[in-house]
Image: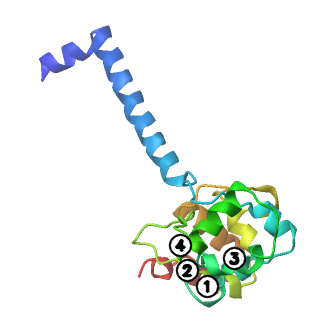
Amino acid sequence: MKALYTSLKHPLARGGGIVLVLVVITLFAAFVRQTQASPEQPILFPHNLHVGLGIQCLYCHPGAARGPNAGLPAQAKCWGCHQQIAKKTPELEKLAQYVQNNEPIPWVPVAIVPDFVKFNHRPHVAAGLNCETCHGDMTKVKIAQNPQVMNMGWCLNCHREKAKDDPVKLQKLIDCSTCHY
């Protein structure tokens, strides 16, 4: 044990220890960043354009009002409008290809919670929260991305804020079984 302590006094050993700690911190930060990064989508869907035209979030994501999963639009929903638009863009060509081949669009969900979290959109919509509360202002975002790190601390801060002066509501909103069941 004394030999280990003596070797740690050596400047190279301390420097190596510091480098090791920095490498571990960097790898952890990269992992967290990767879990929050927006995935590549099969079609670059311009949310800002569609929301700017007045299309409501629930039109394309109707599941948010009914249950846990907001849902992702099927090609038939997109094609319902876009078959009438004469404008040709590379992204609309991709959509037309999915329709022509009768293939579903393989959208990749952006906001994913771990399996041990049971998130449900329905109570949030019923509580009057707008989609942009969690997902950001889509009129300013071309491609969907998480505007903040979605984690337990972030959710709990919101739950505490919503329950402010109501201890019964606070207890319900911060109880572990509210999100982990």
Q: Nearer the viewer, mark 3 or mark 1?
A: 3
For disc 3, the marked residue is 79
Residue 124, relative to residue 28: is it above or below?
below
Instruction: Answer above or below: position of 170 versus 151.
Output: below
Q: Secondary structure at mark 4?
A: loop
Residue kind at label 2, given as amino acid type: Asn
Residue 26's label in the rendered image is none
On the rendered image, what quadrant is the C terminus found in? bottom left
Pair 4/1: label in front: 4
The amino acid sitting under disc 4 is Asn
Q: CA distance from mark 3 to mark 2?
A: 22 Å
Whole-number angstrom distance, CA of label 4 to CA of label 1: 26 Å
Viewer-nearest of labels 3 and 2? 3
**Nearer the N terminus, badge 3 or badge 1?**
1
Does the residue at mark 1 contact the one at mark 2 (Cβ under 8 Å)? yes
Considering depth in this image, is 94 or 25 the residue closer to the camera? 94
Q: Are marks 3 and 2 in contact (CB under 8 Å)?
A: no
Question: What residue is disc 1 on?
Answer: 63
Helix, strand or loop for disc 1: helix
Determine the CA span between mark 3 and mark 4.
13 Å
Residue 119, horizontal then vertical, whole percent = 52, 77
Of the two numbered discs 4 and 1 on the same chain, state the one appearing first in sequence.
Answer: 1
